[in-house]
Amino acid sequence: MSLAKRSTTKQSAKREFLLMLDRQLAQSSHGDPARAALHGAALACRELLSQRWARTQAEDAARGRDARCRRVHYLSMEFLMGRALRNALAALDLTDTLRQWLADHRLDLATVIEAEPDAALGNGGLGRLAACFLDSFAELGLPSFGYGIRYRFGMFAQAIQDGRQVERADDWMRDGTPWDIQRPALSFRIGFGGTVGEDGQGGRHWQPAEVVLASGHDFVVPAVSSERVSTLRQWQASAARPIDFARFAQGEYLAAGQHLLEADALNWVLYPDDSTEAGRELRLKQEAFLVCASLADLLARHLDEHGEIESLAHYNAIHLNDTHPALAPAELMRLLLDQHGLSWDAAWQITRQAISYTNHTLMPEALETWPLRMFERLLPRHLEIIFEINHRHLEAVRARFPGDTGLIERCSLIDERGERRVRMAALAIVASQRVNGVAELHSKLMVDTIFADFARLFPQRFINVTNGVTPRRWVMQCNPELAKLLDQEVGSGWRRDARQLRPLAARAERGSLQHALAGIKRTNKQRLAADIEAQLGISIDPDSMFDVHVKRIHEYKRQLLNLLHVVARYQSMLAHPEGADGKGWVARTVIIAGKAASAYHTAKQIVQLTHDIGRRINADARLNGRLKLVFLPNYGVSLAERIIPATDLSEQISTAGTEASGTGNMKFAFNGALTIGTWDGANIEMAEAMGVENMFVFGLRAEQVIELKQLGYDPRSVVANNAQLRAVLDAISRGDFSPGEPQRYRGLIDGLLQNDRYLLLADFADYVQAQQRADQLFRDPNAWQAQAARTIAGMGRFSTDRTVAEYVDSVWSVQRAAGSSTLSD
Ligand SMILES: *Cc1c(COP(=O)(O)O)cnc(C)c1O
């Protein structure tokens, strides 16, 4: 496109945008003006983005035949998208246009942006990774679809009452969903239950007992440096039949519409509490619903473009984000066998070539399994197919390892111990051409531990692809001042190629750079301090070290270890007000945020303990405000975007060997926070990239953790040898922080002393020392900022642009699928 033409297109887009805004505002003349403006701006952006969407789809269809890279279908139960307006405005180059228009209407842009609710359709890192991938799919121009479910109430909104977490429905769609593009033509019938019989032609016929409709809603994700977009297609369930009119006429309103409600329940929340049978069944139905609707859509598109089914895997990659969509191979087999009449071998070859799977956790209890009887009741034909896959799989194993019955049991798709269950990870592995972990250590432990048997069977199948984050949202948008500084220092190319941040390391010692970094950090900290004061009434010192631990609350992430340090510090400050070395205490503000799963008692206790300790410390005048502990409620993407640019010290302190990768760690480092962390997940690769001397590394390594547990770890002996630790545990255990209920944390602390599964006590002393090293460096602001510059400089590898490019090369490419080794392996 010529320059002149591009500028007229831009002018006309701008004109169109303003016209739409005026029209929208005119239509919503009352109510909250910021919300009305938000709605109007979103609708106007959506219109322009949907034009880009249509062009992108036309390009992809035309590229079709000789695309080197297949269309990628990324199936995920979670997409943690956050807000969309700022991203859309940046991509459309309309930020200033909207700011001006709002000013003319006496509104300001920040207020309007803040009025947008987060699309919090996810739980944590796995869902945010999927959202970062969509950003990189667009930026790299990768033909793709993300597939998810349109949860009306997300996961839950966290509120704090009396220091305790309470869960509320997150009613994020209350004001409507202006970003959604409805696709009325996309509607698929999804079956559950019923019976399976002969179809009269030697095949099988499934007659479901219940049918729901899946309808598609598209959310468009733009690139910044091109007009390409990617698509998040979210399915919404509704009943296939209208109300029962006869019953309605008899006045039985609820009974007349019972099935409408049951279908709608599929859309309500992500991860219904799985502590009940009904919750578990709903979850399995959601997973099946996602998989069946997405594959129906994929097949329809493929047949439309290519007219035959045999080339399906040549043109399409299907990726499973963890095992939640692991029903996909069974559903694809069902479609190919029962609807397209393919032979088992032909169908299996296509399935194996199309599917790949990412594992996100090593915790055995997190590996999904479903009771056979539940599966049979809801998905009888899928279960038949899984049995057949298993039969053939085990035959092959027996042939290769005759007599190894232990191996057969361990790698069966059916767990026969106790109640029989389907192992979803086993299904995903057997059906995939590639299985990847998400950081080097995790990928190694994956094949050494939970998947050791499968790695023996299929050694070529397992690879590593280290996670990343998108620098567009996690630097450009959340920290525009830093983005501007980076542009000045290394040019603006880092926005698309984060490796271009490297030269920053050579400039780390420059006073002007240190000064600029410190100034930006201070501004961000002041803004967060003002938020905290306004929201929680806690006043914090913007010159104190902001020491931040934000992520899901989980024992393995060790928020409790952080609290042990806070209490130790508190006790030391009271005992030695002049500081250990007579130089006084470095002022610290410890900030914690994160949601605890609703049925996870210990995690909820940790939330409460944070509040109890905070209440006491924050009110203790003897500290002169030099230690504060703040819990920010309802952690999510928007809160993260606020907190991360204001962080000095990033807490990444999981027990070595437990955090698969982490992506929070990367967001902080991109924003110039220094990391205090264990030798775990992607921390290791980050340390190697930036130079390990730029990170505060502490604690046992993964192999030491294993060794210690084998030797017999005794937490009590650790405590017996550490008076400081003893004093901390005693204070919490006897109720110093919960005087109204002194027994409140007795169980929590006793639990640590009896079975410290995540080795908090073993790592405590080393953690406290690492914290002292952080204090020391913080006293020298220039040295601190030099280290921040080297941290940023080392982050080049940790962009999802690199991650996605690796998936394309080693998982999703045509060459990969065509390679012979992928099938025999
Ligand atoms: C990045 C992110 C996470 C993942 O954080 P980890 O520290 O890797 O666990 C979780 N939640 C939100 C909202 C995020 O943005």
Image (cartoon, rainbow, N blue to C red):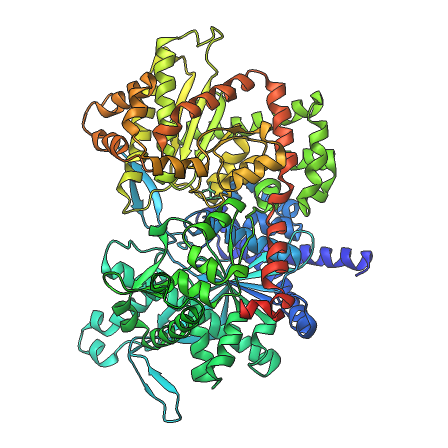
Q: Is residue 328 visible?
A: yes
The residue positioned farthest toward the bottom in the image shown: 200
Q: How many marks?
A: 0
Closer to the camera in the image, 407 or 20? 407
* Residue 555 vertical placement versus 619 (above, below): below
Which quadrant of the structure image shows residue 58?
bottom right
* Residue 119 vertical placement versus 816 (above, below): above
Q: Position of residue 492 (x, y in %)?
A: 72, 42
Q: Position of residue 315 (x, y in %)?
A: 60, 72
* Residue 333 vertical placement versus 491 (above, below): below
Looking at the rendered image, the quarter that the N terminus falls into is bottom right
Q: Position of residue 472 (x, y in %)?
A: 61, 46
Q: Is residue 796 left or right of residue 82?
A: right
**Residue located at (65% from left, 47% from top):** 97
Q: Is residue 619 visible?
A: no
**Residue located at (63% from left, 46% from top):** 95
* Residue 87 vertical placement versus 560 (above, below): below
